[in-house]
Amino acid sequence: MVLGAMLILTVFNVELGVKAFSVTGYSMKEMILVIPPIFVLLGLLDIWVPRETMIKYMGEGSGLKGIILAIFIGSAAAGPLYGAFPIAAVLMKKGVKFSNILIFIGAWSTTKIPMFLFEVASLGTKFAVTRLLIDIPGILIIAFILSAVMSDDEVKKIYDNAEHFDD
Amino acid sequence: MESGDKILDIALYVVTGLLLAFSFYKDKQKTKKALKKAWKAFENILPEFLVVILLVGLLLAIMNPEMISKIIGEKSGWFGVLLASVIGAITLIPGFVAFPMAALLLQGGAGYMQIGAFISSLMMVGVVTMPVEIKYFGKKLTIYRNVLAFLFSSVVAFVIGMVMSL
């Protein structure tokens, strides 16, 4: 369907259409570069890290330790946001608490350490630090609201879904 | 600005390669299983990934930096913030391109508030990546998360606007 839209665009505006295809080539290259290591990492994580360990550190009752770990793992990440979702699925398989999954995704999306350094360089320390300081409570609040609006059944369905992502 | 991107890619590969080599050294069978799992997980999401990549191509062709700076470049106030959030939400630009671009927009006359909104929604809201997100988290959570992140961008804009004017 999207391919169709691009072909139609090309018919109406050849220049724009060609550009769309060349940008697609570029993002394809980006995906081919970034995606394989992310999936290899999640495969290794799945095989080597025991479920009990993950539950202990990030599962129900992991408290502040789990929250800090979720922020840290998310912030240490590289790659676009869509890379976070497959990793989150493995974390769910390993019994990580739902709110910690949401915090992990929030951290991955916006508090990545390498990005922060780059933000300081481009937009200045004041801008980058201010953003970081609002983002951390923001991530926690969003995770809290999301956990509240999702019923136990709905959360269970998401976890069941994650269970079947590699078969 | 691309060199930063490359360093990250290389770091990702080096770390993954080392872990993979260590895993292989420890247990060949387990490593094989891990790679099989990696491939299966990838195969499952591949159709959604392809849709996202085509959408990104389509949108970036229309919403190029010149276009974006035209829209939020000189406008200020809350309408500019709203527009900046919308543009950030629907585009998908890597941070290593987005930050220098934001710096250029600032020089071009955009306010800190708009840039704060743009950067924030760019990173946290992903309209084009929704097909991938929905496959993992379902429609409800995906929509709620993106809407909340979008609203949060305005909060970021407000605080950044305030702090930067101090």
Image (cartoon, coloured by chain):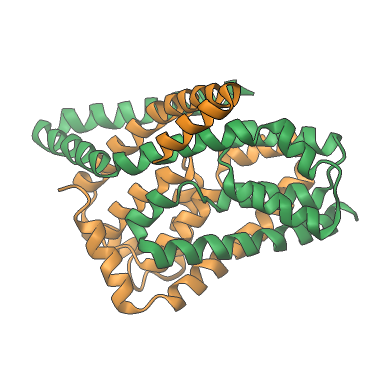
| Closer-to-camera residue (B128/B116) | B128
- Relative to B18, does residue A132 appear above or below in the rendering? below
In percent of the image, x 71 and y 46: which residue is there? Answer: A128
In percent of the image, x 46 and y 37: which residue is there? Answer: A5
- Relative to A141, does residue B130 appear above or below in the rendering? above
The location of residue B88, given as percent across then percent down, is 64, 47
The image quarter in which residue B102 lies: top right
Residue placed furthest toward the right: B166
**Quadrant holding the C terminus of chain B:** bottom right
Q: Is residue A66 visible?
A: no
| Closer-to-camera residue (B116/A92) | B116
The location of residue B19, given as percent across then percent down, is 29, 32
**Quadrant holding the N terminus of chain B:** top right
Q: Is residue B86 left or right of residue A92?
A: right
The image quarter in which residue A147 lies: bottom left
In percent of the image, x 36 and y 60: which residue is there? Answer: B137
| Closer-to-camera residue (A88/A25) | A25
Q: Is residue A10 left or right of residue A49?
A: right
The location of residue B31, given as percent across then percent down, is 16, 34
The image quarter in which residue A152 lies: bottom left
Q: Is residue B116 left or right of residue B75?
A: left
- Relative to B51, does residue B3 appear above or below in the rendering? above
Q: Which chain is orange?
A: A
The location of residue A41, given as percent across then percent down, is 31, 38
Q: Which chain is green?
A: B
Q: Is residue B27 visible?
A: yes
